[in-house]
Amino acid sequence: MFDRVIDSDFKKVRAAVSDVVSYLRAHLGEIEECSLYEIRVILNELILNGIKHGNKEDSNKRVRISVYIDDESFANFTVEDEGEGYNYRYLLCRHCHPSGDAEAYDIKETGRGMLLVKNLCDRIEFNREGNRVKVCKKLHQDLQKLKRSN
Protein backbone atom coordinates (compact mmCIF):
# COMPACT_ATOMS: atom_id res chain seq x y z
CA MET A 1 0.00 0.00 0.00
CA PHE A 2 1.14 3.53 -0.78
CA ASP A 3 0.44 6.19 1.84
CA ARG A 4 1.74 9.74 1.73
CA VAL A 5 0.88 12.97 3.50
CA ILE A 6 1.84 16.24 1.82
CA ASP A 7 1.64 19.86 2.86
CA SER A 8 -1.01 22.04 1.23
CA ASP A 9 1.48 23.32 -1.32
CA PHE A 10 0.74 23.24 -5.05
CA LYS A 11 4.44 22.66 -5.74
CA LYS A 12 4.27 19.25 -4.05
CA VAL A 13 1.49 17.85 -6.24
CA ARG A 14 3.62 16.81 -9.22
CA ALA A 15 6.05 14.82 -7.07
CA ALA A 16 3.21 13.11 -5.21
CA VAL A 17 1.55 12.05 -8.48
CA SER A 18 4.89 10.81 -9.86
CA ASP A 19 5.45 8.77 -6.70
CA VAL A 20 2.04 7.13 -7.10
CA VAL A 21 2.76 6.26 -10.73
CA SER A 22 6.14 4.79 -9.71
CA TYR A 23 4.41 2.73 -7.03
CA LEU A 24 1.89 1.39 -9.56
CA ARG A 25 4.61 0.50 -12.06
CA ALA A 26 6.69 -1.22 -9.37
CA HIS A 27 3.75 -3.43 -8.40
CA LEU A 28 2.16 -4.05 -11.79
CA GLY A 29 4.89 -3.59 -14.37
CA GLU A 30 3.98 -1.82 -17.57
CA ILE A 31 0.64 -0.03 -17.61
CA GLU A 32 -1.04 1.33 -20.74
CA GLU A 33 -0.10 4.95 -21.33
CA CYS A 34 -3.76 5.92 -21.66
CA SER A 35 -4.47 4.52 -18.17
CA LEU A 36 -1.46 6.36 -16.75
CA TYR A 37 -2.59 9.62 -18.29
CA GLU A 38 -6.05 9.22 -16.78
CA ILE A 39 -4.55 8.38 -13.38
CA ARG A 40 -2.39 11.50 -13.51
CA VAL A 41 -5.42 13.65 -14.37
CA ILE A 42 -7.51 12.08 -11.59
CA LEU A 43 -4.82 12.46 -8.93
CA ASN A 44 -3.85 15.99 -9.96
CA GLU A 45 -7.46 17.08 -9.78
CA LEU A 46 -8.20 15.43 -6.45
CA ILE A 47 -5.04 16.66 -4.74
CA LEU A 48 -5.36 20.19 -6.12
CA ASN A 49 -9.01 20.27 -4.96
CA GLY A 50 -7.94 19.14 -1.51
CA ILE A 51 -5.37 21.90 -1.26
CA LYS A 52 -7.41 24.69 -2.83
CA HIS A 53 -11.01 24.01 -1.86
CA GLY A 54 -10.63 21.70 1.13
CA ASN A 55 -7.69 23.17 3.01
CA LYS A 56 -8.18 26.67 1.58
CA GLU A 57 -4.45 26.73 0.76
CA ASP A 58 -3.66 26.71 4.50
CA SER A 59 -0.02 25.61 4.68
CA ASN A 60 -0.62 24.22 8.18
CA LYS A 61 -3.05 21.63 6.80
CA ARG A 62 -2.17 18.43 4.97
CA VAL A 63 -3.53 16.16 2.24
CA ARG A 64 -3.27 12.37 2.56
CA ILE A 65 -2.94 10.22 -0.55
CA SER A 66 -3.41 6.46 -0.21
CA VAL A 67 -3.32 3.83 -2.92
CA TYR A 68 -3.84 0.11 -2.94
CA ILE A 69 -4.29 -2.39 -5.74
CA ASP A 70 -6.91 -5.07 -5.29
CA ASP A 71 -6.88 -8.60 -6.66
CA GLU A 72 -8.74 -7.57 -9.81
CA SER A 73 -6.18 -4.92 -10.88
CA PHE A 74 -8.25 -2.00 -9.68
CA ALA A 75 -6.24 0.86 -8.27
CA ASN A 76 -8.04 2.42 -5.33
CA PHE A 77 -7.01 6.02 -4.69
CA THR A 78 -8.08 7.88 -1.56
CA VAL A 79 -7.41 11.59 -1.16
CA GLU A 80 -8.36 13.26 2.11
CA ASP A 81 -7.91 16.87 3.16
CA GLU A 82 -8.32 18.52 6.56
CA GLY A 83 -11.06 20.88 5.41
CA GLU A 84 -14.70 21.02 6.38
CA GLY A 85 -15.87 19.20 3.26
CA TYR A 86 -18.50 20.23 0.71
CA ASN A 87 -21.75 19.15 -0.87
CA TYR A 88 -20.35 16.72 -3.42
CA ARG A 89 -23.81 15.37 -4.34
CA TYR A 90 -24.85 18.79 -5.57
CA LEU A 91 -21.62 19.25 -7.49
CA LEU A 92 -21.79 15.89 -9.24
CA CYS A 93 -25.50 16.04 -10.06
CA ARG A 94 -26.32 19.67 -10.79
CA HIS A 95 -25.34 19.59 -14.46
CA CYS A 96 -26.46 16.10 -15.35
CA HIS A 97 -29.19 15.64 -17.89
CA PRO A 98 -31.76 12.86 -17.54
CA SER A 99 -29.52 10.77 -19.82
CA GLY A 100 -26.73 11.00 -17.22
CA ASP A 101 -24.57 13.13 -19.50
CA ALA A 102 -23.34 16.54 -18.41
CA GLU A 103 -22.75 19.52 -20.60
CA ALA A 104 -19.15 20.46 -19.76
CA TYR A 105 -19.46 23.90 -21.33
CA ASP A 106 -22.31 24.70 -18.91
CA ILE A 107 -20.30 23.88 -15.81
CA LYS A 108 -18.58 26.56 -13.79
CA GLU A 109 -14.81 26.37 -13.83
CA THR A 110 -14.70 25.04 -10.27
CA GLY A 111 -16.98 22.10 -11.09
CA ARG A 112 -15.34 20.72 -14.19
CA GLY A 113 -12.54 18.87 -12.44
CA MET A 114 -14.76 16.61 -10.36
CA LEU A 115 -16.97 15.88 -13.35
CA LEU A 116 -13.83 14.90 -15.27
CA VAL A 117 -12.70 12.66 -12.42
CA LYS A 118 -16.14 11.06 -12.23
CA ASN A 119 -16.00 10.25 -15.95
CA LEU A 120 -12.44 8.89 -15.89
CA CYS A 121 -12.89 6.46 -13.03
CA ASP A 122 -14.92 3.29 -12.59
CA ARG A 123 -16.30 4.27 -9.19
CA ILE A 124 -16.18 7.34 -6.96
CA GLU A 125 -17.21 7.54 -3.29
CA PHE A 126 -17.15 10.35 -0.75
CA ASN A 127 -17.29 10.27 3.02
CA ARG A 128 -20.25 11.99 4.64
CA GLU A 129 -18.37 15.25 5.26
CA GLY A 130 -17.10 15.50 1.70
CA ASN A 131 -13.43 15.88 2.60
CA ARG A 132 -12.35 12.37 1.57
CA VAL A 133 -12.85 10.87 -1.87
CA LYS A 134 -12.11 7.32 -2.98
CA VAL A 135 -11.73 6.59 -6.67
CA CYS A 136 -11.44 3.13 -8.23
CA LYS A 137 -9.81 2.77 -11.63
CA LYS A 138 -9.28 -0.43 -13.59
CA LEU A 139 -5.67 -0.64 -14.68
CA HIS A 140 -4.82 -2.05 -18.08
CA GLN A 141 -1.37 -3.47 -18.46
CA ASP A 142 0.52 -2.71 -21.65
CA LEU A 143 0.74 -6.23 -23.10
CA GLN A 144 2.95 -5.14 -26.01
CA LYS A 145 5.66 -3.82 -23.68
CA LEU A 146 5.32 -6.84 -21.40
CA LYS A 147 5.89 -9.19 -24.39
CA ARG A 148 8.97 -7.22 -25.51
CA SER A 149 10.52 -7.36 -22.06
CA ASN A 150 10.14 -11.16 -21.79
Image (tube, helix red, strand yellow):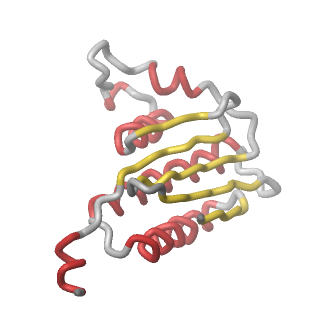
Q: Residue furthest top?
A: 98
Q: Residue furthest front?
A: 71
x, y percentage for residue 79? 61, 50
x, y percentage for residue 88? 57, 28
In the rendered view, would you say 139 is above or below 104? below
x, y percentage for residue 16? 57, 67
In the rendered view, would you say 40 is above or below 134? below
x, y percentage for residue 107? 40, 28
Q: Which residue is at a point 54% across and 35% down the rendered structure image?
A: 125
Q: Which residue is at a point 35% across and 38% down the rendered structure image?
A: 119
Q: Nearer the viewer, residue 45 or 65?
A: 65
In the rendered view, would you say 12 is above or below 63? below
Q: Disc count in the image? A: 0
Left or right of 97 in this view: 107: right
Left or right of 17 in this view: 8: right
Q: Nearer the viewer, residue 52 or 29?
A: 29
Instruction: Give the quadrant of the C terminus.
Output: bottom left
Q: Could you say which quadrant of the image residue 60 lies in?
A: bottom right
In the rendered view, would you say 27 is above or below 75? below
Q: Which residue is at a point 45% across and 21% down the rendered structure image?
A: 93
